Structures are given as structure tokens and as C-alpha cells.
Amino acid sequence: TAAATIGLHNQRIYAQTVINCLREAHHLRAHHPHWGLGLTAVRCRNRLEWANTHI
């Protein structure tokens, strides 16, 4: 945990500091589950073809 983590020069790292760093790096976001229809076989195949051509 952030409270138990020792940083450089034996200074404690506060939880809010860790949260701020993760937020700046875009690694801390609210998870919103997908609402709606899933991919059909045709749309899935089309997405795969598109992804393969844009690699």
C-alpha cells in the first residue's frame, strides 16, 4: 500500500500522491461496463480485417 511504501531517501509516499501519479499517467479511470449489443460474427470479422490492415 502507499502508506507502507518507502520512496527515495526513506520518505513515505502518501496515497494521494500515488493516485495523482496514476491519474496523470491515465492508468486510473472508472470502469464502465459495456451496455449494448455485443459484436455479431460479421461485425467481429470486419473489425478483425480492419485491425489487420491497419497494423
Image (cartoon, rainbow, N blue to C red):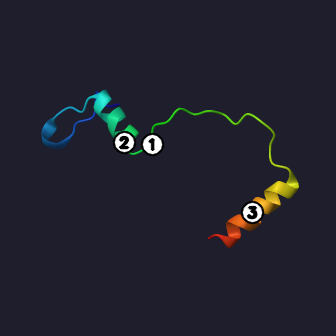
Residue, x 77% and y 36% (percent of image)? 36
SS under mark 3: helix
Circle number at residue 27? 1
Depth check, mark 1 against mark 2: the one in front is: 2
Above or below for 27 versus 48: above
Circle number at residue 12? none
Q: Quadrant of residue 27?
A: top left
Residue, x 66% and y 34% (percent of image)? 33
For the residue pair 41 and 11, the one nearer the viewer reads as 41
Position of residue 35 measured from the top left corner of the image (x, y, whole percent): 73, 33
Amino acid at circle 1: His
Circle number at residue 24? 2
Amino acid at circle 3: Leu
For the residue pair 8 and 37, the one nearer the viewer reads as 37
Instruction: Tell me which label, 2 or 3, sits earlier in the chain.
Output: 2
Amino acid at circle 2: Glu
Q: Is residue 53 left or right of residue 6?
A: right
SS under mark 2: helix
Q: Quadrant of residue 26?
A: top left
Quick check: marks 1 and 2 in contact, CB under 8 Å? no
Instruction: Tell me which label, 1 or 3, sits earlier in the chain.
Output: 1
Q: Is residue 54 left or right of residue 6?
A: right
Position of residue 38 measured from the top left corner of the image (x, y, whole percent): 80, 43
